[in-house]
Amino acid sequence: MKSTILLFLMVFVAGLSNAQNLDKQKTKVTYTQLPLKPLPEEITQYYVETDLGYIYSGDSKTETLNKIGSAANIGHLEKTTDQGAKLLVRLETYYKSEVNFETVVKKEKRDDKEVSVTYHYLTFEYKYPLYFELTLPGEVDKFYSEFSNNSNQMSRYKSSEYRTSSELSKWWNSNYKSVQGKLRTDLLNKNVSDLRFTLDKFFSYRTNTLYTEFLTVKKFKSFEYDDIDEAWGKAKLALEEISENDIVFSDAFNAKMEEAIVIWKKAIAESDLESKKTRINKKVTEALYNNIFLAYAMMSDFEKAEQVKAMAEEKINKRAIDNYAESFLEGRKERFEINAGRIPNSI
């Protein structure tokens, strides 16, 4: 039995030693992302109108307005006092439902016995709606509107649990105002943050970061991977061509990345999926397909990227392409399709 286990371990270790190891060449590039709901090209200005509901005592009206004002921003447009598209932001009055005093019975160990213990707590629902709408000049119908962070929906508050109803009441009477104040502040911050994110996502040409991961292969026994290293060198030079103002990456980027693709494709031509001991085995083949897929996605050649994905899935498996790279392709393709006919190379 021991000899069988020993033999198994030797085979297992040998299998590990026969496997090529990949190096993940991680970098990040900053570029400009297209909007998902582009405004008409003639819109170059906008202004903000703010409508506040009742502001509770202890909450700062000035601070509230500053938070909304800093979030109500459409990056690439000129902000004016009353010209261009109108961005209305309305903070409605904070609402809290009636308080429900409730109990829960729990089983607990006391000495060697299990006993039932009643705990007291309270719940209520609350909301602090933040609504915004965007209207184009001369239009009556809204171009877009929504409640940030679904803030028109109620949230539920549950207090800590107390051993007696009198302890719960004492805590609530002492902390009612501070609890409500914290809930208002937290909700306002979340809703304002969502407002900023939504305006950036839908209407702005915004700076975005892509974390790239191209794969190389470490030297393995008698196999050399100078060609794969050379391809990464060309891809790295291509990445250095990207500027944060770029929407469509430059011809220089495409030319250098195409040189890398040629090398990766040549390596794939010698792929042998059945043997782990060959130079371009299954693991390396999958890595090369991922490199080519990401390269084409960055070049905005979506058709070729999807062809590479189909080949990789047919040859290897359905999950051959990295999820992050595929998500980048889908998002970039969607934005390019929405903005078709009006995509500048950079801004």
Image (cartoon, rainbow, N blue to C red):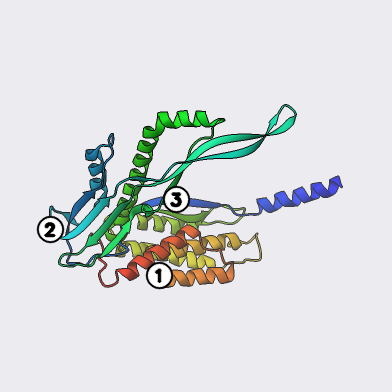
Measuring from the top left, give residue 212's x and y in whole percent: 42, 54
SS for dot 2: loop
SS for dot 3: strand
User: Can see residue 242?
Assistant: no
Q: Do the residues labelled 2 and 3 touch (CB within 8 Å)?
A: no
Say which quarter of the image contains residue 224.
bottom right
Q: Which badge, 1 or 2, comes first in the chain's sequence?
A: 2
- CA separation, marks 3 and 1? 22 Å
Q: Nearer the viewer, mark 2 or mark 3?
A: 2
Q: Which residue is drawn at 49% across and 59% down?
A: 323
The residue lying toward the viewer, choosing from 241 and 224, is 241
Disc 3 target residue = 26
Q: Do the residues labelled 1 and 2 touch (CB within 8 Å)?
A: no
- Amino acid type shown at disc 1: Phe
- CA separation, marks 1 and 2? 39 Å
Disc 2 target residue = 83
Q: Which of marks 3 and 1 is in front?
A: 1
Q: Which residue lies furthest to the right in this view?
A: 1
Disc 1 target residue = 302
The residue lying toward the viewer, choosing from 305 and 43, is 43
